[in-house]
Amino acid sequence: MKAYVRTFGCRANQYDSEVVRGLIEAAGGEIVDTPAAADVAIFNSCTVTADAEADLRRAVRGASRPSIVMGCASARAPEAVGALPNVTHVVQGADVAAVAIALGLPASAVAAAAAARPGVQTGARALLRIQDGCDEHCTFCATTLARGANRSRPAEDVVAEARALAETHPEIVVTGIHIGSYGVDAGSSLGLLVERLIADIPDVRFRLTSIEATEVDDRLAALYAGDQRRLAPHLHAPLQSGSDAVLRRMGRHWYTAASYARAVERLASRVAPIALAADIITGFPGETAADHAATVALVRDLPFTSLHVFPYSPRPGTPATRLERAVPPALARDRAAELRALGAAKAAAHRASRAGGTADVVVVGDGARRHGLTEDYLSVQLSDPAMPRRSRFDAELVLRDTGLVAMPLAMAKELDG
């Protein structure tokens, strides 16, 4: 069997696709690069925005192959997904055992599917999902509807998988739907888990994906301020809006603009360099010019190094679709463009500030796309493009006409000498 696997959406989805790939290969199947070369196409769907679902529909129609659709869109709207041409099976969520059944794999493969965890993933950096679901109920979010309540994986399982991944991957990205809630259902915490990962698994660099700024407790802050070769100084903290009125309408009750700013500034004062990223939604129902101005002012004041900005996208079944005072889409796009320009300027300033400094670089990408990734999430050129993928080295960041270049410290010292 030859299978084509395509993933839409977040790193949690990417992790689930890696598990499916591992399952197929363990059963003797082959993963191919195009639908045309496949016997079956598997699409791991996203429901965060209408655009994500539109991309899924285009991909399924264009594949012209018997298709299995899994993931969040299939969980939220299984009938609509199942009506797409060539879709033979709809798997709601990340049920790997159901994918195995849909593929017609033997009973032994189906039984093993629930515990399937590939020790080597396709990316240079490995993904490690530590939990699924979310207990919050943001009024704009369909992911909670699709993924359900928070469910933490046992720490022993997480550590065992991380240990296997560390044999091949120099960086492990800790992911999930709401990783800051890890352990609340088991008497633990994200800080305790990361502390154990760092203690039990030497050498590898861990990186956290999206986490709420106010969920960085003292234990986790101490780890961030510790050895940056072990925990990357990278905080992706969803902001969504700098207006308290909008945050309340979004159902994001656990922080205000002021408490978000305090949490971010507290960490930035202890960790340098630091990558600080945020998600922002523009044009949420009821957002006024003053609300938008408050967001712009907060972004301007805080040390962000990148922003992920997108206009509000109504998702069927979410409470936000019932809110009044819709913002015209063109205005939402204009506001997004303003924030993106501000984010780009901040990203450029951060990049410029790193010239002449040192970095911990992991080599990622293939062929002409091969590059380095620093601890503070800068994509940098390699002084030697032939450096092996998944290698890791200490570098000096040299500014050249083409941009920042990572030069191994030993080479840089020779040139300086």
Image (cartoon, helix red, strand yellow):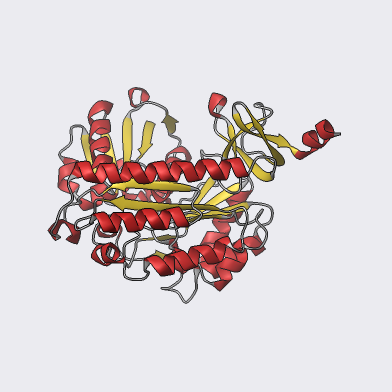
Q: Quadrant of the C terminus?
A: top right
Q: Quadrant of residue 344?
A: top left
- Look at 38% across and 58% down and name the residue there: 239
Q: Position of residue 302 (x, y in %)?
A: 48, 57
The residue positioned 59% from the left and 48% from the top of the image is 171
| Picture residue at 30% right of the left edge, 54% below the top | 292
Asked which quadrant contains residue 151, the reply is: bottom left
Residue 197 vs residue 67: left or right?
right
Q: Is residue 322 above or below residue 366?
A: below
Task: Please identify the quadrant where the N terminus is shown.
Answer: top left
> Which residue is most to the right?
417
Residue at position x 69%, y 52% in the image? 203
Q: Quadrant of residue 377?
A: top right
In the rendered picture of this protein, how many numbered marks are placed on residues?
0
Q: Nearer the viewer, residue 407 or 404?
A: 404
Residue 366, compared with residue 291, is above or below; it is above
Residue 150 locus on image (x, y percent): 36, 66
Judged left or right of residue 95, residue 215 is right
**Which one is in front, 59 or 241?**
241
For residue 364, say whether it is visible: yes
Where residue 360 appears, as percent x and y from the top left, is: 67, 46
Residue 196 visible to an observer of this rendering? no
